[in-house]
Image: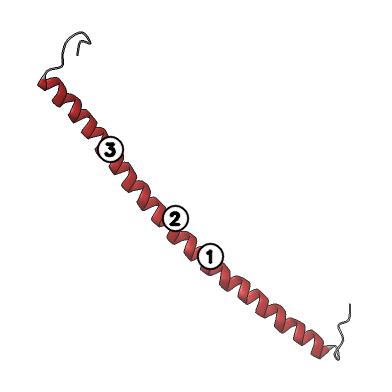
Amino acid sequence: MNENRTPTHSDIYLMLGRVEGKIDGFLAQSARQEKQIEDLEDRTDRLERSQTWVVGAAAGIGFVSSILTFLFTGGFIVF
């Protein structure tokens, strides 16, 4: 379009179509990013839950081993 002339209806429709196409592209990209964020949140939740079990199991094993050490050493921890 030449800058020195008044845009025609066809020019305006063409520009509106381009803007609409860009908005559609942004909306599609936004939807993909939302899906990726949801997937990452699910993965993070699963990882955090599994780590909770590991830490709990380690604490339980430490507790049991300290009691066994106490019982087998006659009540005293020997180094």
SS at circle 3: helix
What residue sits right under mark 3 in the picture? 25
Mark closer to the chain start, 2 or 1: 2
Contact (Cβ within 8 Å) of mark 2 with mark 3: no
Residue found at the far left of this picture = 9
Amino acid on which disc 3 is placed: Gly
Which label sits in the foreground, 2 or 3?
3
- For image coordinates 62% across by 76% down, the residue present is 57
Query: Image quadrant of residue 52?
Result: bottom right
Q: Residues within 10 Å of mark 1 (few under 14, many from 20)?
A: few
Residue 1, disc = none
Query: Image quadrant of residue 16?
Result: top left
- For image coordinates 76% across by 87% down, the residue present is 68
What residue sits right under mark 1 in the picture? 48
What residue sits right under mark 2 in the picture? 40
Where the C terminus falls, by quadrant?
Answer: bottom right
Left or right of 51: which side holds 20?
A: left
Residue found at the far top of this picture = 4
Left or right of 30: which side holds 68?
A: right
